[in-house]
Image (spheres, rainbow, N blue to C red):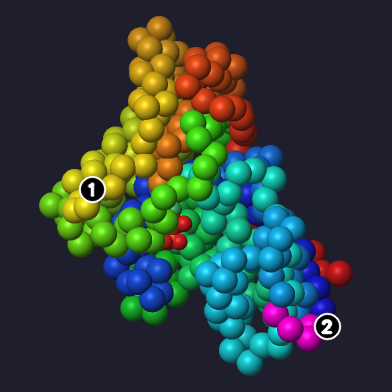
């Protein structure tokens, strides 16, 4: 029996991932770019070689769907694996568009491979994390990370890669409009959008150029350029969701309230740009000195705000 514990932070996409070109391997239709966040994290302990599979999620037995997904994921680490225990917990709301699956599968990949006694490169771990959840491949690294589209049919080159050696000290102000579980899981929403939105081809066509703009903005530390491409990618993604059949809308009235507040801040000369994922919550990119003011502007529309700095790499220790 051997045991390892991993810690990973969630990431928020600045240029978004939405749509898959291969469902089984979880290969994306578009490249993407993200920021890993500090403070919010998943802690996962894997015990390799127990008497039966037992999976705990935030202290309770995982539901059957999650348990099946974890069991399958562990078998990717070793198809002849022994029974395992997994104990995973988040210090932030799960399944509310706050990217809990990104830190979840990054931590599970790291802990499972270490507990199994194997040594994999970070790229291999990122490819594994991607199989659990696409966005998880970006959470192996801190700061700004690109998820390459890749060319290979087996997906071995579709993984995260850090794009800036040192962090640029920006802030994400996370406004929790609702912490309820989202009604449509991302995978189902992506597939229905891909199959039915007439805007999906345009979404795919413009994604690489958006990642280019985003990468350049990060390297130049140009917040306005990064904020503009982030908002544009966000609105294009939601436009493809809305125009699918059936339509898919993750926003709530509070989401629009936050967007209005961000536009008012910009009119007042504050550099603030908004992004939303598969949920109603709004994350606002800004500089550290503006973050309190952004949080105050969001307050009428949200349950809570968190001001988050860029986070570091995922880590693991064997014990
Ligand atoms: C992203 N999202 O780039 C996009 C933007 C939500 C909107 O990745 O199906 O949990 O497991 O690959 O990664 C959320 O979806 O989806 C997501 P799967 P994932 O962050």
Above or below, comparing residue 124 to residue 209 in the picture: below
Residue at image coords 54%, 39%: 179
Q: Is residue 203 magenta?
A: no
Q: Is residue 51 magenta?
A: yes
Closer to the camera in the image, 103 or 207: 103
Residue at image coords 29%, 62%: 191
Circle 2 packing at 10 Å, graded few (<14), some (14-19), many (20+), is few
The picture places residue 113, in percent across and down from the top left corner, at 67, 75
Instruction: Work out which quarter of the rendered image holds the C terminus and state it.
Output: bottom right
Quadrant of the rendered image containing residue 307? top right
For residue 287, the mark is none
- Quadrant observed for ligand 1 in the rendered image: bottom left
Above or below, comparing residue 37 to residue 63 in the picture: above
- As drawn, is 85 to the left or to the right of 159? right
Instruction: Work out which quarter of the rendered image holds the N terminus and state it.
Output: bottom right
Ligand 1 within 8 angstroms of badge 1 C-beta:
no
Outermost residue to the bottom? 80
Residue at image coords 40%, 7%: 268
The picture places residue 164, in percent across and down from the top left corner, at 53, 45
Mark earlier in primary sequence (1, 2): 2
What's the distance in space between the residues labelled 1 and 2, CA to CA?
A: 49 Å
Give the mark toward the camera: 1 or 2: 1
Can the viewer see residue 117 in this picture? no
Q: Which residues are magenta?
A: 49-53
Residue that mark 1 sits on: 247
The picture places residue 75, in percent across and down from the top left corner, at 59, 83
Residue at image coords 78%, 86%: 51
Q: Secondary structure at mark 2?
A: loop
Residue that mark 2 sits on: 1
Closer to the camera in the image, 120 or 258: 258
Mostly what secondary structure, the magenta segment? loop
């Amino acid at each position: 029996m051997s045991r390892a514990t991993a810690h990973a932070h969630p990431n928020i996409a600045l240029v978004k991932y939405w749509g898959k070109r291969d469902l089984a391997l979880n290969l994306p239709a578009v490249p993407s770019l993200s920021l890993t966040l500090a403070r919010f994290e998943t802690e996962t302990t894997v015990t390799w070689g127990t008497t039966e599979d037992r999976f705990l999620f935030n202290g309770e037995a995982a539901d059957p769907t999650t348990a099946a997904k974890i069991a399958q994921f562990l078998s990717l680490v070793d198809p002849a694996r022994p029974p395992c225990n997994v104990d995973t917990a988040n210090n932030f709301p799960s399944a509310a568009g706050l990217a809990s699956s990104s830190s979840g599968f990054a931590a599970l990949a790291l802990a499972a491979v270490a507990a199994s006694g194997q040594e994999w490169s970070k790229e291999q771990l990122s490819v594994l994390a991607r199989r659990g959840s696409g966005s998880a491949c970006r959470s192996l690294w801190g700061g700004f990370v690109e998820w390459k589209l890749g060319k290979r049919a087996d997906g071995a080159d579709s993984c995260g890669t850090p794009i800036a050696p040192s962090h640029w000290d920006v802030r994400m102000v996370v406004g929790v409009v609702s912490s309820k579980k989202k009604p449509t899981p991302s995978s189902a929403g992506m597939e229905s959008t891909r199959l039915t939105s007439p805007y999906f081809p345009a979404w795919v066509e413009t994604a690489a150029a958006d990642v280019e703009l985003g990468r350049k903005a990060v390297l130049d530390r140009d917040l306005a350029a990064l904020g503009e491409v982030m908002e544009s990618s966000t609105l294009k993604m939601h436009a493809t969701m809305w125009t699918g059949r059936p339509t898919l809308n993750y926003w709530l009235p509070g989401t629009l309230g936050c967007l209005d507040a961000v536009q008012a801040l910009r009119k007042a000369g504050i550099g603030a740009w908004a992004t939303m994922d598969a949920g109603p919550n709004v994350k606002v990119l800004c500089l550290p000195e503006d973050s309190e003011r952004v949080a105050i502007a969001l307050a009428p529309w949200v349950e809570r705000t968190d001001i988050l700095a860029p986070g570091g790499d995922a880590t693991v220790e064997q014990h």
